[in-house]
């Protein structure tokens, strides 16, 4: 039995804490606490075909611990996050005799995690669930912090619940089969957190970027641990996004989401759009004289090594981007508060007038890598 590192997301009284376990080959030798939690219970494993085909066999130790196991299929990728899928899951759970003490396991990327968590959170007013994230993005970001949800035709992540998983099992050896572009997308979220929360993690990303992008488990594991630690700290301070602290995780997402919306979720992966959002946040922070000179340069140099797909600027009119940002889920009555990088390990949250954003967007789209004037 291995002593796996565990980080606990503490939630206010009345909520459920989440234990996040991280390690290479963790699923082959799951923590006794998790086996005990599963023992004798009816478990439903929700996954998509490609993930199950690649890695389903690795779930054997968990399956053996549960009382009984049934696998439920959802569509692969973002397509899983719709109302029809949730309806099918609820009906399947009921038909198979799902009870209040049944539990659900999300086995897949962030899409499977989001839809499964939402289904679990509302089924019989909420049953427990376990996250087994299989992408880098899901291990460092989506599986931690209790946000679950689905998309409506009119907007991504527009319906959801805070429903923290009882446990998260992040087995980093699953990441060896991830395509480079998926690793890149997850690493952007790591850089986002490192930039404003953990200077040492930033240095590590700079040092190890080549091996990280190549899916090397030995270099990925400590990076997942540090990124999760950063997210756990922030989420613990603001579990339901009420104090504003959690907003720091939104760095790069204001423009990133707008780019995704205007491109109708084609062309760029989420992390790639966020990388451009981060570049724009650097630019705004420079314009407002908030960022230390070398920090912007350092982040740009790092993101430059990601070999991002080129921004399809002919499909990104400034007016459309501004309109999308004005409709941002996180916009308040007073307008948009931007998360901006200040110095390494520190952010600054600042309402920025739409006029100034417009002024910077034009030159940014012409050259996303340039300094603000
Ligand atoms: N709840 C949150 O806090 C939160 C945070 C960030 C993102 N998200 C959500 O996460 C979703 C994106 O998640 P994602 O980036 O993990 O993408 P994803 O879940 O859509 O998966 C992307 C692809 O990776 C494949 N895949 C999964 N694991 C694999 C593996 N080990 N090897 C090879 N291929 C594998 C899948 O089959 C899929 O085709 C979005 O819907 C986003 O909104 C949620
Ligand atoms: Zn993100």
Image (spheres, rainbow, N blue to C red):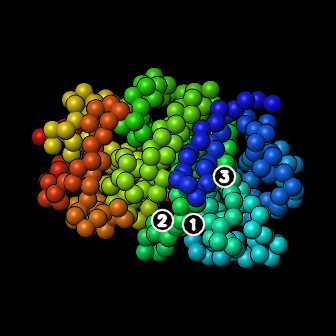
Choose the circle earlier in sequence order: 1 or 2.
1
CA distance for labels 3 and 2: 22 Å
> Label 1 crowding class (10 Å Cα cut-off): few <14, some 14-19, many 20+?
many
Front tag of 1 and 3:
3
> Label 3 crowding class (10 Å Cα cut-off): few <14, some 14-19, many 20+?
many
Q: Residue at x 29, y 64 (%)?
A: 332
Q: Position of residue 339 (x, y in %)?
A: 30, 48
Disc number for residue 157: 2
Dot 3: element: loop
On the rendered structure, is 192 left or right of 71?
A: left
On the rendered structure, is 168 left or right of 358?
A: right
Which residue bears the numbered disc 1? 81
Dot 1: element: loop
Q: Position of residue 336 (x, y in %)?
A: 26, 59
Beta carbon of the mark 1 residue lies under 8 A of ligand 1: yes
Which residue bears the numbered disc 3? 166
Residue 325 visible here: yes
Q: Quadrant of the N terminus?
A: top right
Which one is in front, 327 or 168? 168
On the rendered structure, is 14 left or right of 271?
A: right
Choose the circle earlier in sequence order: 1 or 3.
1
For the residues labelled 1 and 2, say whether their Cβ atoms are less than 8 Å apart: yes
Q: Position of residue 330 (x, y in %)?
A: 35, 61
Q: Give the residue at the far front of this rendering.
A: 13
Q: Residue at x 14, y 54 (%)?
A: 356
């Amino acid at each position: 039995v291995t002593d796996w590192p565990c980080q606990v997301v503490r939630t206010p009284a009345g909520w459920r804490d989440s234990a996040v376990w991280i390690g290479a080959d963790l699923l082959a030798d799951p923590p006794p606490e998790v086996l005990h939690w599963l023992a004798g219970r009816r478990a439903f494993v929700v996954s998509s075909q490609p993930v199950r085909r690649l890695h389903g066999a690795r779930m054997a130790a968990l399956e053996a611990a549960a009382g009984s196991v049934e696998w439920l299929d959802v569509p692969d990728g973002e397509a899983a996050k719709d109302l029809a899928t949730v309806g099918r899951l609820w009906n399947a759970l009921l038909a198979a005799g799902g009870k209040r003490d049944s539990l659900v396991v999300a086995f897949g990327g962030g899409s499977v995690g989001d839809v499964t968590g939402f289904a679990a959170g509302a089924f019989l007013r909420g049953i427990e669930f376990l996250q087994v994230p299989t992408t880098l993005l899901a291990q460092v970001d989506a599986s931690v912090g209790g946000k679950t949800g689905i998309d409506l035709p009119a907007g991504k992540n527009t319906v959801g619940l805070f429903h923290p998983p009882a446990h998260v099992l992040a087995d980093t050896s699953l990441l060896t089969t991830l395509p480079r572009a998926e690793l890149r997308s997850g690493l952007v979220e790591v850089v986002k957190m490192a930039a404003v929360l953990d200077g040492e993690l930033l240095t590590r990303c700079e040092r190890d970027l080549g091996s990280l992008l190549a899916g090397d488990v030995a270099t990925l594991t400590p990076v997942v641990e540090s990124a999760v630690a950063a997210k756990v700290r922030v989420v613990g301070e603001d579990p339901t996004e009420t104090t504003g602290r959690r907003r720091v995780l939104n760095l790069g997402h204001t423009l990133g989401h707008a780019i995704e919306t205007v491109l109708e979720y084609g062309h760029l992966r989420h992390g790639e759009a966020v990388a451009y959002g981060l570049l724009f946040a650097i630019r705004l922070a420079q314009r407002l004289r908030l960022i230390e000179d070398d920090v912007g340069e350092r982040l740009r140099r790092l993101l430059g090594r990601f070999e991002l797909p080129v921004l399809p600027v002919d499909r990104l009119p400034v007016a459309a981007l501004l309109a999308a940002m004005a409709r941002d889920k996180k916009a308040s009555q007073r307008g948009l508060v931007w998360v901006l990088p200040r110095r390494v390990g520190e952010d600054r949250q600042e309402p920025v007038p739409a006029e100034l954003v417009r002024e910077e967007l034009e030159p940014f789209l012409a050259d996303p890598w340039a300094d603000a004037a």
